[in-house]
Amino acid sequence: MNNAVNRFYNSIEGAASQSQSGLVELFVYFLTVELGQEAASPKQIIDCFEACDLTVPANVSARLAEGLRSKPPKYIRTNGTYKLQRHMREALSKKLGAETVTAQTSATLRGLEHRLPVGADKEFLKEAIDCFEIGANRAAIIMTWILAMDHLFAYILAHKLTDFNAALSKDKGVKITSVSQRDDFTEIKETKFIELCRAAGIVSNDVRKILDQKLGTRNSCAHPSGVTVNKSKVIDFIEDLVDNVILKFPV
């Protein structure tokens, strides 16, 4: 979330002059509108302040309570979590300017595209970003996940095949005992593939956590559901996989 909330903060005109109560409002907007959460907890709002290297208000819960008592109220409270009243949400959306944020985030992704060497990976990422820019957020996530997995397959075949096969041969939950070509990886479930990459020492535990998290997001996007996929989630998804998989493991 750190990259996404910093990008959001940087997109706010006059962010440095915002009061702490104003920033609380903006971070509730970020969590519930940009990230698509149902509501935001005081702890999550504190995390936003800390991620942006900002002084945390002395009592976030008290500031939220003030917003509940204002006329008209700014928030709706449910089980200790908060979301914006409709009038407040629409006012902040207008203030932030959705088109400006979209343009900035598109530029961020195009910057990632230019960091990749010329080849199939670069072209595939370009198409994923094309999907994002026309609002096909689910497609952008699915394409980026496919790219990351295919890139790892190529990296293992080129540099870590012996290590991967050693880990694979010890795992009784997989039908095959070794891989020798890209198609062989299709015999391994993605959750198991990530486990094997970690067991073989190919990825660190931090990268494993990223892959597990992103796989969950991909699964949510791969089937019809009521889950909302916001632009910030797509940006975070693509940035994480490009920085921590595609660029970290050059083929």
Image (cartoon, rainbow, N blue to C red):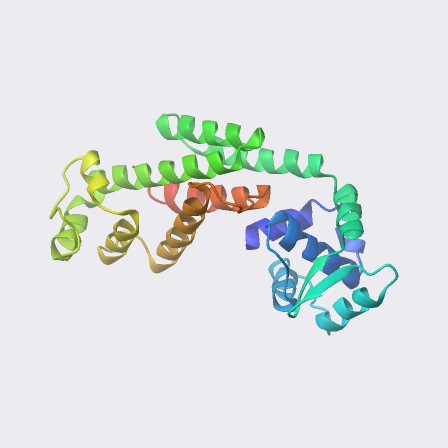
Figure quadrant of residue 79? bottom right
Which residue reaches farthest right?
A: 71
Report x, y in % for residue 105: 60, 38
| Between 109 and 84, the one nearer to me in the picture | 84
**In the displayed structure, does residue 31 sit left or right of residue 209?**
right
**Residue at image coords 17%, 44%:** 161
Q: Quadrant of the C terminus?
A: top left
| Residue 14 visible in the snapshot | no
Report x, y in % for residue 2: 56, 55
| Between 208 and 229, the one nearer to me in the picture | 229
**In the displayed structure, does residue 244 sit left or right of residue 53?**
left
**In the displayed structure, does residue 70 sit left or right of residue 234?**
right
**Residue at image coords 49%, 36%:** 112
Figure quadrant of residue 154? top left
Label total for image? 0
Q: Quadrant of the N terminus?
A: bottom right
Q: In the image, is residue 12 above or below residue 109? A: below
| Between 223 and 109, the one nearer to me in the picture | 223
| Between 130 and 33, the one nearer to me in the picture | 33
Report x, y in % for residue 125: 44, 31
| Residue 173 visible in the snapshot | yes
Report x, y in % for residue 164: 19, 49
**In the displayed structure, does residue 113 sit left or right of residue 118?**
right
